[in-house]
Every structure is written in C-alpha cells, then in structure tokens.
Image (cartoon, grey):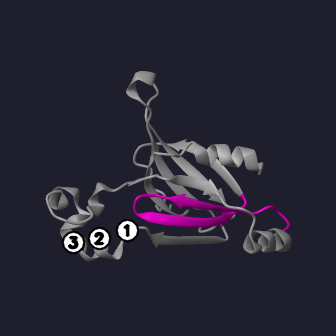
Amino acid sequence: MDVAVLEQMLDETLDQAIVHHGYASYMRDYEVIVYATADPHTGVEPAYLRHLFRYCVEARCETSVSAETWRVSLDDRLIDHETGVDLDGYVWGVKWHCLYPGAKLLPESDATRSWSHEVGIDFHEVLIETNAHRLTLIFSDLQVSEVPIGYAPFVTD
C-alpha cells in the first residue's frame, strides 16, 4: 500500500468518533468503525465508515485513562449514559471515543520488517489514539468503506 495514500486515509479520521473496534468475525482483519461528521454548513451527511486493517498480525489496545480516573470510574452505572451522566467518573456509556490526537503511521520497525520479509508483502504499523484507548496495529493494507447504521461486525450467519 502506498504510504502517502495510507497517511492521507489516517489523517481523515482526526477528531471523528470511534464507535467500535476489534477483529472482524473471521479473525484476520481488524475493524475500526468511525462515525464521521462534518460542519452542518457543508451539507455533508454524517456516515459510519469501516476502516479495515487487512492482514492484521498484531493488535494491542491499552487504556489512556489515568489510574486515578479508573479508580473513580468502576461503578457499573457509568457504563450506561442515563445512569452515569450525573456521577463522578468517566462515563463509559457514551459508547464512543474521540479520535484525538488521532491516527498516525509509525516508522518502520523490526516487527514490520520481519513480517514483510517472512510473508512477502509490505507491513505497516499505526498508532490510533483516542481519549480512552491507544491502539497499535501491524497490518498490510487499509480499506475504507461506508457501512449502514446498525452495522453489527460480529454477527455471523
């Protein structure tokens, strides 16, 4: 995948909202579902975009929420917006994370070089930062497509 195209695709996610992330149901590719909006004056309709990180050989997710915030955010009422909105702590129940500072392509690493050599295709590493998580993915290709409202990535036939 062309690095300039990849960087442009990642730049377009800045300040949008991640509403879901995880491996696709067939467990090879990693999905990041983004709710993309624009200034209402542009006339551009909001959309749910599926960022499919293909051939994802490594996915790490870690919290970016401080231990102090976690300590005051353990109450299960915080996983529902209605019951958590007036409580102190991080309200997990908003069901989205702001993509800020966003996604960036990391420099080539020992891991990406090794995977590229062993598999025979180029691999890249990306860091996706939100207000609650840091995702690091090693993958080969990125595809972006619109998905319908209610898209359920883990439903199997």
Residue drawn 59% across and 69% down? 27
Q: Which residue is mark 2?
A: 69
Q: CA distance from mark 3 to mark 2?
A: 14 Å
Query: Which one is in front in this view, the residue at disc 3 or the one at disc 2?
Result: 2
Residue type at tag 3:
Asp
* Residue range highlighted in magenta: 120-140
Cβ atoms under marks 1 and 2 closer than 8 Å:
yes
Find residue 94 and report its horizontal and vertical position in percent.
29, 55
Q: Secondary structure at mark 2?
A: helix
> Majority secondary structure of the magenta segment?
strand
- Disc ID at residue 24: none
In magenta segment, residue 54: no
Horizontal placement of 134 versus 136: left or right?
left
Q: Secondary structure at mark 1?
A: loop
Q: Which residue is mark 3?
A: 76
Residue drawn 39% across and 27% down? 40
Horizontal placement of 34 versus 92: left or right?
right
Q: Which residue is mark 1?
A: 65
Residue drawn 82% across and 70% down? 119
Find residue 65 and report its horizontal and vertical position in percent.
37, 68
